[in-house]
Amino acid sequence: MRRETISIHGGFICDPATKAVAPPIYQNVAYEFESADKAAALFNLEIPGFRYSRIANPTTDILEQRIAQLEGGVAALAVASGQAALNYAFLTLADRGGSIVSTPQLYGTTHTLLAHTLKGQGIQARFAQGDRARDIAPLIDETTRAVFCESVGNPAGNVCDIEALAHVAHAHGLPLIVDNTVATPILLRPIEHGADIVVHSLTKFMGGHGVVMGGAIVDSGRFDWTSQASRFPMFCEPDESYHGLIYADRFGREAFIARARSVYQRTTGAVLAPMSAFLILQGIETVALRMERHVENAREVAHFLRGHPRVASVEYVGFPDSPYHALAAKYLGDRAPSLLTFGVAGGLEAAKAFYDALKLIKRLVNIGDTRTLCCHPASTTHRQMTPEQQIRAGVRAETIRLSVGIEHAQDIIEDLDQALSAASTPPTIASR
Ligand SMILES: *Cc1c(COP(=O)(O)O)cnc(C)c1O
């Protein structure tokens, strides 16, 4: 099946009990065992089946199969948020200690997870100077357990050369983990370009309506843990917490997801609620259509902004003069993501006046909703940084980030236009 079809049918034919054609919400915690022996086999992970919804649930299972198929992986684990997915992905590989080498353009909370939270778990993050393979390679050593990047960085909008990063990782016997939240498998499938593990915030474009939080980890099934047994003993040696189970032996190509589920989901429980899984499934049914409109609207908005006298600059990978245009063409075709940034002419005060004058477009910090969303990083997400740190992160006082929604493009443009006019009107004596 093609991605448009998987989005609607992947992982579900019809409910075996009732023949319902939409995924039912299995709003239950536990499942009855046929016998003590069957229960024992389930608990030994010898036979598939459900026992307790912290470990697996039939509604969530449909979502996991659908996402695995969309990304071209062999298995997936859905969890309560994108951050939980990232945390479990890193811990599943590196919980005996070690380092993770990452590109620098990351979602803010992911940067904090790597730089601060995981440090307390004995995992050291190493951030490269740039997102090229040559920036990554010098940071890898025998302690390294994975290379990490966002396929399209949020909020930077950079497009990573996944094939080159996978090549460097594999040359060192390491897996490449890719956060594919901004692109979605509709625009880009990292596994086709060599990624080993793909992580998602389902909260954004996949769910797509700004009503539900969720995350997922997808396993390509291609990384050979046993050939790197000294780096990854957790897949190749008996697990004492699971009466001597060896994940690579029992689960083969699904060893990574099996360990993420049996160790982290089971014992630390960042479970996705069945209702949330259902809402995300509803969203995914239209993700291909929505992404088309997101992409088309962003193109129109980017061109409008570039031609506007009150706009100082526009960063949009769809422009031929963008430094990422060639990589965007290679990995996304002509479908540039709907995340773009621009600078309001006139600096901080003009940017704030523009921001406050928006009427249709929402002032908040989120992306990937049906609605057009707007963030002023200098007042919010990047507020704690010094001006120098802001510049390194690609943020200036006048920078505005847009996640272009799926409204009529002309309505989005008219709101931007009236807000830009407000930005340039000198304050009246009364308002001063
Ligand atoms: C939002 C986001 C996350 C975190 O996801 P949550 O669902 O909010 O926990 C991780 N990575 C990227 C690229 C994101 O945009």
Image (tube, grey):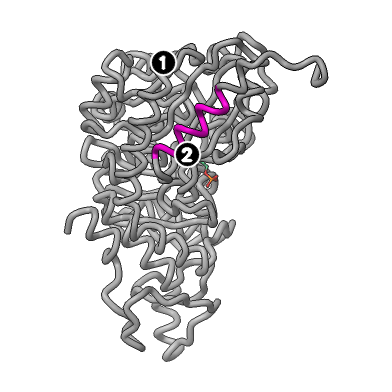
Secondary structure mostly seen in magenta is helix
Residue 240 position, x and y percent, is: 50, 57
Local crowd size for mark 1, using a 10 Å CA cut-off: few (<14), some (14–19), many (≥20): few
Q: Nearer the viewer, residue 355 or 156?
A: 355
Helix, strand or loop status at disc 2: helix
Please give the name of the residue rendered at 46% of the width and 29% of the height, measured from the top-left corner.
100
Q: Residue at x 31, y 19 (%)?
A: 324
Q: Is residue 109 magenta?
A: no
> Nearest the camera: 71 or 307?
307
Q: Secondary structure at mark 1?
A: loop
Instruction: Name which residue lies at 62% across and 28% down.
Output: 355
Magenta range is 409-420
> Percent x, y for residue 23?
38, 73
The residue under label 2 is 94
Cβ at disc 1 under 8 Å from ligand 1: no
Please check the rendered image and state whether residue 411 is part of the magenta-colored stretch, yes or no. yes
For residue 80, what is the image quadrant?
Answer: bottom right
Quarter placement of the N terminus = bottom left
Quadrant housing residue 39: bottom left
**Numbered tag placed on residue 130 in the rendering:** 1
- Is residue 279 in view from this perspective? yes
Mark 1 to mark 2 CA distance (whole Å): 23 Å
Residue 34 in the image: above or below residue 279: below
From this view, report whether residue 13 is shown above or below residue 172. below
**Does 205 sit above or below residue 431?**
below
Q: Estimate the x, y position of residue 332 in percent, counting from the top left.
A: 25, 33
